[in-house]
Amino acid sequence: MEIDLSKPILDMNERLAAENRTELDKHGVFVLDLMASPGAGKTSTILATIAALRDRYRIAVIEGDIASKVDAEKVKAHGIPAVQINTGGACHLESDMIKRALAALPLAELDLVIIENVGNLVCPTDFYLGENAKVMILSVPEGHDKPYKYPGIFQISEAVILNKVDTMSVFDFNEEEFTAEVRALNPKAPIFRIAATKGEGVDEWAEWLAARIDALKASVAEKVGEDA
């Protein structure tokens, strides 16, 4: 006899994620689930995104990591609220973790919450957290063949960020092949070329995200009007 525990776990995760989404919608808060492997530049991309959007939106960050609070401290140093989640070994965040982190944030005073998921190209793909969009980052030093090796994360991402493009000449990265494979897996996802630590290409990415935030706010405002 075999007992498959994965379905009850995923079902519970989905239920709590829906509760997260309901609570966030009350306040019109957009949530971005940012996924990448370790070292791809998640935190630097978050800081660059904050720099681009902080004058337009009220932002908070939920940092997921196996251990340490280093990344949350980096975000807080820029005057942005941040909650650290340490999974103690788990390779992804789950909706109950996000539920507790959201309870520590002033949702009525926020427009955008960025979740930095645990560095991994596999585990985060299966867990809905209540987010509005999943976006993944691949950095040039990781190689152009990652879409072949980890197709799932490319398929579920609404956008792909190619980071560290300023190192393209140093590494054997075939951008044409990379782009073709991403397009084959996910024809609709835009690919943003950035160098986060230098701020290159960040504006285009930030405008895409701003359009999504504004669309959510318009949708929530329309629903409130209908319910009034």
Image (cartoon, rainbow, N blue to C red):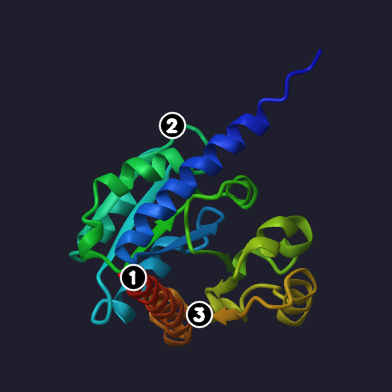
Q: CA distance from mark 3 to mark 2?
A: 31 Å
- Mark 1 or mark 3, which has the lower sequence index? 3
Percent x, y for residue 7?
A: 67, 33
- Whether residue 91 is visible here, answered yes or no, is no
Q: CA distance from mark 1 to mark 3?
A: 37 Å
Is 108 in front, or is 139?
108
In the image, is 113 to the left or to the right of 212? left
Residue depicted at 53% across the width and 39% down the height: 13
Q: Quadrant of the N terminus?
A: top right
Count of marks placed on residues: 3
Residue depicted at 70% across the width and 74% down the height: 173
Q: Which mark is residue 194?
A: 3
Is 179 in front, or is 7?
7
Per the image, label 2 sits on a secondary structure element best described as loop
Q: Which mark is residue 67?
A: none
Q: Which residue is mark 1?
A: 224
93 versus 112 height, above or below:
above
In the image, is 136 to the left or to the right of 100? right
Residue farthest toward the top in the current orientation of the protein: 1
Residue depicted at 55% across the width and 50% down the height: 128
Identify residue type, mark 3.
Ile
- Mark 2 or mark 1, which has the lower sequence index? 2
Per the image, label 1 sits on a secondary structure element best described as helix
> Which label lies toward us, 1 or 3?
1
Q: Which residue is mark 2?
A: 88
53 versus 116 height, above or below:
below
* Label pair 2/1, CB-CB below 8 angstroms: no
Q: CA distance from mark 2 to mark 1?
A: 40 Å
Percent x, y for residue 151?
A: 74, 59
* Label pair 1/3, CB-CB below 8 angstroms: no
